[in-house]
Image (cartoon, helix red, strand yellow):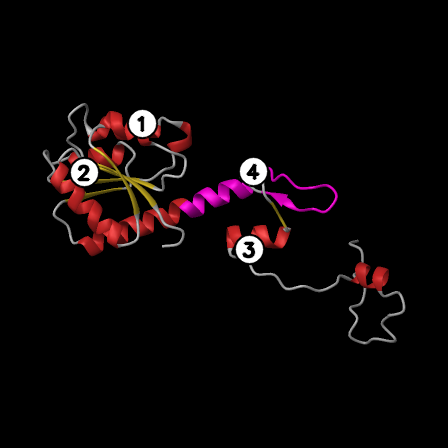
């Protein structure tokens, strides 16, 4: 996945946490580890792409932690995936989803399924985040029409939109610009020149 996805993984069982974190690192993910709810909240950053969460934590339940994370404005859309050794109660998976998680897997789980879940959730989260940025007011220079990104760098409009949406551009001239820059051309001298559009009635 490009760029590297940032995963915050919370599990109080050290051996299990290190084992799963190692598997995910081998798949190209950047993993931050936490053993408690308090450590999880301390490590929350705006660039976290997904939170992988255990249910049984020493200082509070994973369900409570999930609700608390979702109450934080900048993380209300950050995907949470529960990964627990077992569902203690029949309705634990339902409770996890109602708390705001987007999935609940029971460990041990096929690591291919775990990785596929994470990649799908991260992909969707990044799409939502980029669409949200594009919906916001873009800082654009009134003179050269370059766009300023979140880090303060300026980009050509085509470059910015291509990088954030994958849109590819083709270039041409509209009829008004053809008249402006090539006044010697007209429909009679250049049959390929588009005819001016009729104004709407």
Q: Name the residue under label 4.
A: 136
Q: Mark 3 points at which residue?
A: 162
- Do the numbered discs 1 and 4 sit on residues whose CB atoms are within 8 Å? no
State which tag comes first along the sequence, 2 or 3: 2
Q: Mark 1 points at which residue?
A: 42
Q: Does the magenta stretch include residue 11?
A: no
Give the label on residue 93, or none: 2
Extreme-right residue of the structure:
184
Mark 2 vs mark 3: in front: 3
State which tag comes first along the sequence, 3 or 4: 4
Looking at the rendered structure, the secondary structure element under dot 4 is loop
Residue 126: x and y in percent read 42, 46
Gap in angstroms between the C-alphas marked 2 and 4: 35 Å
Corner quadrant of residue 104: top left
Gap in angstroms between the C-alphas marked 1 and 4: 28 Å
Residue 200: x and y in percent read 78, 54
User: Residue at coordinates 16% horizontally, 35% vertically from top-left?
Assistant: 92
């Amino acid at each position: 996945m490009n760029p590297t996805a940032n995963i915050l993984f919370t599990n109080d069982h050290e051996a299990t946490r290190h084992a799963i974190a190692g598997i995910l690192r081998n798949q190209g993910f950047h993993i931050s580890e936490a053993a408690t709810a308090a450590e999880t909240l301390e490590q929350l950053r705006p660039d976290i792409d997904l939170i992988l969460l255990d249910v049984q934590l020493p200082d509070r339940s994973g369900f409570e932690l999930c609700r608390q994370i979702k109450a934080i404005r900048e993380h209300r859309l950050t995907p949470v995936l529960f990964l627990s050794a077992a569902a203690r109660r029949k309705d634990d998976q339902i409770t996890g989803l109602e708390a705001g998680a987007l999935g609940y897997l029971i460990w041990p789980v096929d690591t291919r399924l775990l990785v596929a879940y994470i990649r799908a959730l991260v992909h969707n989260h990044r799409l939502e985040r980029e669409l949200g940025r594009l919906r916001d007011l873009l800082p654009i220079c009134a003179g050269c029409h370059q766009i300023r990104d979140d880090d303060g760098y300026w980009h050509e409009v085509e470059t910015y939109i291509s990088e954030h949406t994958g849109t590819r551009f083709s270039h041409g001239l509209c009829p008004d610009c053809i008249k402006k820059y090539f006044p010697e051309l007209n429909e009679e001298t250049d049959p390929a020149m588009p005819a001016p559009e009729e104004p709407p009635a």
